[in-house]
């Protein structure tokens, strides 16, 4: 019986706010607003790995990160910096066979 690695690519963007933050304590961020997310175009599974390929995110982008987990709502694992601007692929290794993984790429 062959081994199977299930791959599900998703993009989830969370906007978090603190209920304890009031107007007087507002934090000012001077970073430019991202131009948009990268678009995942393929996820090619190996025996215990998956190669993710995506399009570049619109500027401003300084690096990419990959997170993944075993449910659509949880990201248990990740790589905080898989490459600088211009990076369009990354291979996640040491995955368990027969497990569904959900991947997210962010710029």
Image: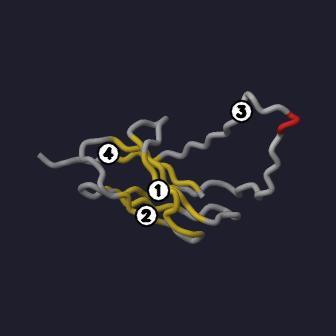
| Disc 3 crowd, CA 10 A, few/some/many (<14, 14-19, 20+) | few
Q: Is 100 above or below relative to 43? A: above
In terms of depth relative to the viewer, which is nearer, 31 or 46? 31
Please tell me which of labels 2 and 1 falls first in the chain: 1
Q: Earlier in the sequence, mark 4 or mark 3?
A: 4
Q: Which residue is mark 2?
A: 90
Marks 2 and 1 close (CB-CB < 8 Å): yes
Give the image quarter of residue 27: top right
Picture coordinates of residue 70, whole percent (x, y): 38, 39
Q: In the image, 50: left or right of 96?
A: right
Disc 4 and disc 3 in contact, CB within 8 angstroms: no
Residue at 49 percent of width and 63 percent of height: 82
Residue tagged 1: 79
Q: Residues within 10 Å of mark 1 (few under 14, many from 20)?
A: some
Disc 2 from disc 4: Cα separation: 17 Å
Work out how far the residue at label 1 is from the one at label 4, CA to CA, in angstroms. Answer: 20 Å
Circle 3 is placed at which residue position? 18
Mark 4 or mark 3: which is in front? 3
Q: Which residue is mark 4?
A: 6
Q: Earlier in the sequence, mark 2 or mark 4?
A: 4
Front: mark 1 or 4:
1
């Amino acid at each position: 019986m062959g081994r199977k690695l299930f791959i599900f690519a998703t993009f989830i963007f969370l906007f978090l706010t603190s209920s304890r933050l009031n107007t007087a304590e507002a934090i000012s961020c001077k970073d430019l607003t991202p131009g948009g997310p990268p678009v995942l175009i393929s996820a090619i599974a190996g025996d215990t790995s998956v190669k993710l390929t995506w399009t570049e995110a619109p500027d401003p982008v300084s690096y990419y990160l990959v997170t993944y987990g075993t449910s659509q709502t949880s990201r248990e694992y990740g790589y905080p910096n898989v490459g600088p601007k211009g990076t369009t692929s990354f291979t996640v290794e040491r995955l368990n066979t027969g497990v569904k993984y959900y991947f997210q790429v962010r710029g």
